[in-house]
Amino acid sequence: MSRSSNELLARSTNKPELFVEIFERHGQSIHSYLVRRAGSQQAEDLFSEVWLRAFKARATYDMSRGDALPWIYGVARNTLRSHWRCGTKAYPGAHSTYADDAPDLSYDPWPDVDGEMDALRLSAALHEALAALEPADREVMLLSAWEQLEPKEIAEVLGMPAGTVRWRLHKARSALQNTNVRPTPISQEIQ
Amino acid sequence: MNAFELLEHAGSVDPAPDDVMGRARRAIVTAATQSGGRRPWLGMRLLDSHPGIRAAAAAAVLATGGVTVWAAVGGHTNPRTNTTIECGYNTYIPVESGDPVVDCRNVLRRQDHQVPALSGWITPTGLVAVLPKSDRPPAGSVPLPKGFHENGSVLYLDDEMNDVAAPIATGCTSAANAKGFASKELGVAGLSGWVVKVRPGAGSCSIYVSLTDASSKTLTLIPESYSSSPNVTVSLDKRLRSQLGSSPDARCVAPADAAALVKLDARDLHIDARSVIVSQGGAIGTGSPKCSIATLDPAGGIEVTIWIVPGTSR
């Protein structure tokens, strides 16, 4: 019987080689998450850093959580946050603090994410509707729509109660419901 | 298509390219090899004691375009070289008894040093330092566990299998060839009873990185996509392999001569001498004649370890 990701993560504290198995399971998901928020080039630069941070911080993982994937999304989110705040894509030095998995909802990375969404060809109306959402509502919405996470998992990524996530998801969905969602026609793009 | 469906659709992206996955995988493998408090082949260097050398080495590699798949750990300054004991400060000694503290004490005694009481530490970066008991170790260090034993053969195996220019890492290799190379190196190291496993996923053109697990006597080969990344570290490694390894022109030389050869080759390749750190790994395996070979560290600066191996078996 194959081990669950959270069991692998917990056991990797003493058997670090097991962490490679976690990477094999979730590497693609985390890469997609980074691409959607920072673009392919930046994602390439940040991908290894996310996994090294997660590896270094694995001892801080709480085994009582569900699957390990939301925790790794949390590490990826904080790596992105550091990247956006510092305006650097350099890898952290050996003496950096890796166990930085505490979520921070005070920072709104929307302008950076939105820049990448231009390449995704959303309709202008949907752009506007997403931009008008509260940052936390938008974050919940994107984790649900793009990462296909359940409210309980989103709650773990963002460090908020699952009930709050459900409420924010409801608010975001309601706000987007009446949006004119037609994609931008190609002819308009050329102009 | 409603707003949510469109949003979901807009979020679809291409899968991560093989080389991006490979770099991250290699970084994790490197980190895993360096860490793990209970594993007996932890690094034997106290990097924190000579940051100047590290900085010079890293600068030299970067200046010569040494950012490659091999240096996937980027600014992660902890090198993978796990093969030498730093005894006191800036003194590197080979594995002899396997007990870092005993080996360090013996070397200092042979040099007529007044030997203080020594203690061994595992630093926060997973490396091992032997220091006078009166000296404070790097912050966050923990005492070396009782019974800690350094196995030179395992260190050699790990170094050789992950060397930047090892035959399984320099070009397309089949799983059978990679396994054959691993078996041969196990023989060179004199390690018996080991199992070589190959992870699935090898393509038509794969290279292999290795996970060395002494506790289960397992060597796992992990295929990665091939990416040619010529740089000065690889050039030096290939040159040394042709001179010291099993190539027809290779010579069987003593460790001191091998170390001198490293310096000469580095000079020919216009590598700043300060960026090259040469350490002695010690003698491993059985059989004769005993010849020197060199393995190069893939991350950080250019760290060369000279090993004495049975010459006829290479």
Image (spheres, helix red, strand yellow):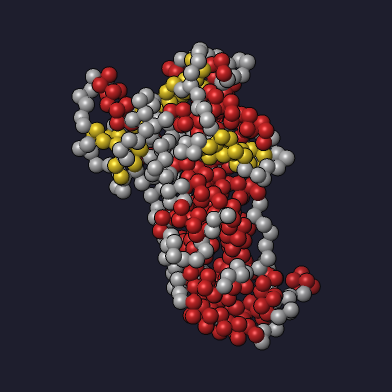
Tell me if B264 is positioned left or right of A128 in this view: left
Percent coordinates x, y for residue B258 in the rendering: 48, 19
Is residue A80 in sight in this rendering? Answer: no
Tell me if B111 is positioned left or right of B47 in this view: left
Residue at horizontal 62%, vertical 80%?
A: A128
Q: Is residue A102 above or below residue B74?
A: below
Q: Quadrant of residue B53?
A: top left
Percent coordinates x, y for residue A176 in the rendering: 63, 83
Is residue B312 in sight in this rendering? Answer: yes
Residue at horizontal 42%, vertical 23%?
A: B282
Image quadrant where one finds the C terminus of chain A: bottom right
Image quadrant where one finds the N terminus of chain A: bottom right
Q: Nearer the viewer, residue A87 or B223?
A: B223
Q: Is residue A106 above or below residue A14?
A: below
Percent coordinates x, y for residue B197 in the rendering: 60, 38
Percent coordinates x, y for residue B174 in the rendering: 69, 35
